[in-house]
Image: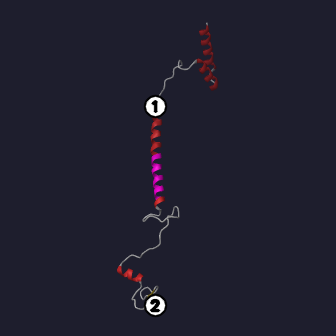
Amino acid sequence: MGFKKCPKCELNYIRDDEQVCNVCKRSMKGEPDADDSVAICTECGENPAVCGSELCAMCLREVRRQENLEKRADELNAASVDDMDDLDELEVPLDDDDIPEMELEEIDKELGGDDDMSDELEDEEEAEEE
């Protein structure tokens, strides 16, 4: 029993009693070529990729998780910006009676307040002492 080249493709060897090789038989039947090679994940380079994707199952899950986290962060940022706008609209009235005079003097000193204000405070203090 000897071997000869397939008359159709002239690549594969077949037995003398066969007409064509197995590859040519499949192509004549219309069956797709069996692709035995496994695509490797482009992200990690270790695991086989999911059919129809370039990523493995683990990397695909991680990508989706990251996308969900980014969406949540965007939603939270949008909500916090809206809250800050509401805070800007609030006005808190401050009366001079609410802040003790001693603290007012310290504030004026720290901020380099007008001497006229400190003179007025001193005049008021002297009037109260008398």
Q: Secondary structure at mark 1?
A: helix
- In the rendered view, tell whether residue 12 sits above or below residue 92: below
Please tell me whether the stretch drawn in magenta is mainly helix, strand or loop: helix
Q: Which residue is found at the position 61% from the left and 12% from the top?
A: 125
- In the rendered view, tell whether residue 38 sits above or below residue 88: below
Q: Nearer the viewer, residue 106 or 123?
A: 106
Asked whether residue 44 is drawn in magenta, I would say: no
| Left or right, 84 with reference to 30 | right
Q: Percent x, y for residue 110?
A: 64, 25
Q: Percent x, y for residue 82?
A: 45, 38
| Mark 2 vs 1, N-terminal side | 2
Residue where numbered disc 2 is placed? 3
Q: Nearer the viewer, residue 94 or 36?
A: 36
Q: Nearer the viewer, residue 85 or 120?
A: 85
Residue type at numbered disc 2: Phe
Kindly report the distance in space between the C-alpha atoms of the residues bearing marks 2 and 1. 92 Å
Residue where numbered disc 1 is placed? 89
- In the rendered view, tell whether residue 41 sits above or below residue 12: above
The part of the chain drawn in magenta is: 59-73
Residue type at numbered disc 1: Glu
Q: Which residue is found at the position 61% from the left and 23% from the top?
A: 107
| Left or right, 114 with reference to 30 | right
